Image (tube, rainbow, N blue to C red):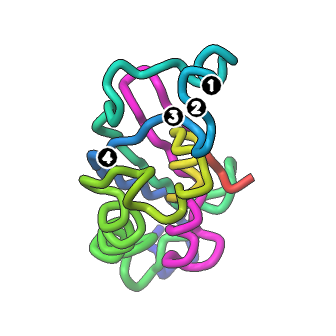
Amino acid sequence: MSAAGGLRRRARLSRLVSFSASHRLHRWGVITCVTASAGLFPLSPRPGAWPHAWVRADLGWAEEEMVKIDPVTGMVMNLTDLKEYMEEAIMKPLDHKNLDLDVPYFADVVSTTENVAVYIWENLQQLLPRGILYKVKVYETDNNVVVYKGE
C-alpha cells in the first residue's frame, strides 16, 4: 500500500558526530589532593586528558513510539538540517575546547560525561522541533557510555 493510501509509516532517526575536548574532573575551589583523598575524583596524572568523545542523537517521541515519516518528503527530518543543528549544539561549543575553561556552562558544573550529555541535550532541545529529541548518547570511550533522555 502506498503512503498516499493511508499507511502511517514511522521511523527513528539517529546521527553520530565526534568531537575532541579536554576536561578535568574536579570542583573549583577544592584542593585536588583533598578531593582525591575524599574519593570524589582520582588525581589525574595528565590534567586535561581524555581528548575525545562521540555523540549520538536519536530523534523520536518515546521508547515505543517513533516519528511519523512525512508523506511528501519521505523523511523524519532532513539530515542536512540535523547535521547543522548538531554542528551548532555540539561541535561549535565543544570541539577542540577545554570544557572547564572554554565553555561557560562548565564554570559551575563538573565536566563529567553525564553533565556533557545534559549540556548537549539542552543545546539540541533549543534547535530541534519541539519534543522530537528522544535521547543523547555520549561515548567517552568504547566502554564508557552515558545515555540521557531529558529526565
Residue 89 forms part of the magenta stretch? no
Residue extending farthest to the right is 151
- The residues tagged by marks 2 and 1 sit, at their Cα atoms, a distance apart of 6 Å
- The residues tagged by marks 4 and 2 sit, at their Cα atoms, a distance apart of 23 Å
Q: Which amino acid does label 4 sit on?
A: Ala
- The residues tagged by marks 1 and 3 sit, at their Cα atoms, a distance apart of 10 Å
* Of residues 60 and 111, the one drawn nearer to the viewer in this rendering: 111
Answer yes or no: do the residues labelled 2 and 1 have beta carbons within 8 Å? yes
Sequence-wise, the earlier of marks 1 and 3 is 3
Disc 3 packing (10 Å; few <14; some 14–19; many ≥20): many
Judged from the image, the secondary structure of the residue bearing numbered disc 4 is strand
Disc 2 packing (10 Å; few <14; some 14–19; many ≥20): few
4 vs 2, front mark = 2
Which disc number belongs to residue 35?
A: 1
Judged from the image, the secondary structure of the residue bearing numbered disc 3 is loop
Give the extent of the magenta segment: 121-146
The residue singled out by tag 4 in the image is: 21
Which disc number belongs to residue 31?
A: 2
4 vs 3, front mark = 3
Q: What residue type is labelled 2?
A: Ile
- The residues tagged by marks 4 and 3 sit, at their Cα atoms, a distance apart of 13 Å
